[in-house]
Image (cartoon, coloured by chain):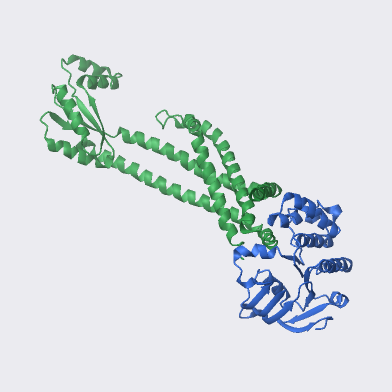
Chain colours: A blue, B green
Amino acid sequence: MIFFENVSKIYSPTSTALKGVTLRIQPKEFVSIVGPSGSGKTTLLKLLTVEERPTEGRIFFDQSEVTMLRPKELPYLRRRIGKVFQDYRLLPTKTAYENVAFALEAAGHLTKEIEHDVPQVLELVGLTEKIHHFPHELSGGELQRVAIARALVNRPEVFLADEPTGNLDPVNTREIIRLLLKINELGATVILATHDKEIIDSLDRRVVALEKGEIIRDEERGKYII
Amino acid sequence: MAIESLKRIMKSAAVSFWRNGWLSTATVLVMVLTLFVIGGLVLSSVLFNTILASVEEKIDVSVYFLPNTPEELIINLKSEFQKIPNVREVAYVSQAEALERFRERHKDNPVVIESLQELEDNPLEASLNISAIDTLKFQDIVTAIEARQEPTVDKINFRENQLAIERLSKITTASKTTGAVLAIVLAFVAVLVTFNTVRLAIYTARDEINVMRLVGATAWYIRGPFLVEGIIDGALAAVVTTAIYFPIIWFLAPKLQLFLDGVNMFDYFVSHFFEFFAILLGTSVVLSVLSSILAIRRYLKV
C-alpha cells in the first residue's frame, strides 16, 4: 500500500509543486493521475522513488516510510518500483537486450537468470525481433516498449508511468496502455500520470485530478474533467 | 555475487570505452599531454641536477703549503680539515702532481715549458683542495682553517675567488628554486586540464547515471565502470607517452652529452625505463581515478 500523508513540495518560494496532498493507493490498483502540465504529477511520482524529498509530510510504501530511507537503502526501494517516462530514458550505448539486462545486473541477478528473463520480458512487450537493436534504430513506440520491459523485468510491485504516451501516435498509445493494463492484471499496482483525455475516458478506472499541486477530485471510476 | 558484479563492471567499462571511441580517444590524448609534461619535468630535473652538480663540484678552495712542508703533516691536516662542518671532500695534490698538472695545462706554450725547465727546484706548492656541501658557506670553512694559524700554510685562494664562488653558488641555488616552482606550476596546469576533461566525459554520461540510479543500481555499481575506464585511459596514456619519449630522447641524447659530462641521456633513460614508466603510469591512473570519483560524486546524490 502507498500512502502520501499531507505532503508538500516547495522548490522555491515562487514554485510550489505540491500542497498538502494526502493520497492512499491500494495494492493492485490502477490509478491515473491527471492534470495540466505543472500541476505536480511528475513531482508526485518522483517523491515515491525518492528522486525528490518532500518539504513537508510523510510517504509510506508498505510498512516503510520512504522519506526516512538513507541513501544506501534507496537502490533496494527502486528495484521494487518500475518506472517509465515520456522520453524513454534508455541508455543510448546499450542494445534493447542490454538495456533490459542492465536492470537485472544492477540488482545482482545471476547471468543464467538474466539470459532466461530478458528475452521473455521482451517477448511480452512484442520486441523479440529487435532484441539486439540500439535505441537509435528503434521507433518511439518500440523505445517505450523497451523501457517498459526494463521497468518490468525486476518484477516490481508498483509500476509508475510518467506521460508514457506523450510522444506517441494513437496506435502506439493504445498498445502501451494495453501493456499497462496487462501489467496491472499480472498483479502490480500501476500509477499512470497523463493529460490525455481519451486514455482516461477509455480506461474507466480510478482518477485523481491535480491542479496547482492540490488534489481537486478523486473518483473511483473517473472521467477526465478539469 | 561480488565476482559476478566485478566481471560486469569490467565488461561494461570495456564496452563503454570502445563504443564511446571518440570521447575515449580525446580523454587519452589529453592525458598523454599531461603525462608528457610530467615526464618532461622528471627528465629535465635529472638533467638539471646533473649539470648543477657538476658545476658545484668544480667550485673548490685550495690551501697551499710552503715548499718543503713534510707530506705527513699535510696528510694529517687533510684528515683534520675533513672534520670541519660542511666539508664534502679534501683532495691532496703533492708538489710533483701540481707540476705535472701545470705542464699538462701549458703543454702548448713552449715559453712556459722552457722557463720551467730552467728552474732547478719545483716552484709549485703542494695543496689541499676542499669542496663544500653548501658552496654558499665556504666562508665558514675558510675561517675555521685560518683560525688554526698553521705555520706551514702559505695562502688560501678563497679571498681572491670569493666573489666568483658566491655568485656562482647563488646562481645554482636560484636555478634550483626556479626549476621547482616551474615544475609545480606546470604539473598543476596539467592536472587541472586532465581533471576537467574527465569531468566533461562524465558530464556527458549524467543521463546514463540517472537511469542507473533509477533501475536500482547501487552507488558502487554505477561508479565502478567509470573507475575502470579511468584506469584503462590512464594506462593507455602512460604507454603512449613512454613510446613518444623514446625517439625524442634518442634524438636529443648526443646533443645533450656535451652539457652532461659525457652522460648519455638515452642510456640513462633505458636503464631507468621501468622507474620512468611507473611514475607516468602511477600519476595517470591515480589522476584519472581521482578525477572520476570527484566528478561523479555530484551525480550520485539522492
Q: Can see residue A3?
A: yes
The image quarter containing residue B296 is: bottom right
- Front residue (pair A163, A61): A61
Q: Can see residue A212?
A: no
Percent position (x, y) of residue A139? 83, 59
Percent position (x, y) of residue B83? 21, 35
Outermost residue, front side: A63
- Name above or below for residue A156 compared with residue B279: below
Outermost residue, bottom side: A216
The image quarter containing residue A197 is: bottom right
- Front residue (pair A93, B179): A93
Which quadrant is home to the N terminus of chain A? bottom right
Percent position (x, y) of residue A91? 73, 57
Q: Which residue is drawn at 61% across and 45% down?
A: B232
- Name above or below for residue B128 compared with residue A44: above
Q: Is residue B175 left or right of residue A78?
A: left
Q: In this view, does B77 lie to the left or right of B174?
A: left
Q: In this view, does A166 lie to the left or right of A8?
A: right
Percent position (x, y) of residue A56? 62, 79
Outermost residue, right side: A171
The image quarter containing residue A172 is: bottom right
